[in-house]
Amino acid sequence: MCLSDFAILELLLHRGPQPVNTIGRRIDLTSGSVTTAVDRLEERGFVVRGSDPDDRRSRIVSLTPDGTKCIGEIFGHHRDAMDRAAGGLTKGERTTLIELVKKLGRSAEERLKEQPSNE
């Protein structure tokens, strides 16, 4: 599985169904690249596209049960690798690191919202 496929599945796992354009913005893919990646994941049966009830022009991408199973297994390996990488940190240091990374992520997300959309 390539990095963009992993990033899309991980985003959907942790954030739930997302509009295609939001996926591209959140994982920094162009419109064409995110469409290709979603097509690839859809062909593998990992995601489905549906209509957005609030915007007829937008399509919502959701995980299928197979997609949830796949990313759950892959993310489990990723989590284990991250645990091993952080093995030299104390419990307090891990807690601080997690808080800081979350703060960084929220800040980055706010900055993305402030940028004009390229779509």
Image: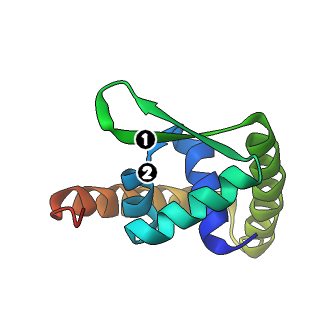
What type is the residue that disc 2 sits on?
Val
Which residue is at 41% across, 60% downward?
A: 26
Q: Secondary structure at mark 2?
A: helix
- Above or below 57: residue 86: below
Q: Nearer the viewer, residue 48 or 14?
A: 48
Which residue is at 65% across, 73% downward?
A: 3
Q: Secondary structure at mark 1?
A: strand
Q: Residues within 10 Å of mark 2 (few under 14, many from 20)?
A: some
Q: Locate residue 114 relative to residue 4 in the image: left or right.
A: left
- Above or below 46: residue 37: below
* Quarter in which the N terminus is drawn: bottom right
Residue at mark 2: 20
* Distance from the alpha carbon under mark 1 to that under mark 2: 6 Å
Which residue is at 21% across, 62% downward?
A: 117
Q: Does the residue at mark 1 contact the one at mark 2 (Cβ under 8 Å)?
A: yes
Q: Nearer the viewer, residue 43 or 113?
A: 43
Disc on res. 59: 1
Answer yes or no: is residue 28 visible. no
Answer yes or no: is residue 64 visible. yes
What type is the residue that disc 1 sits on?
Arg
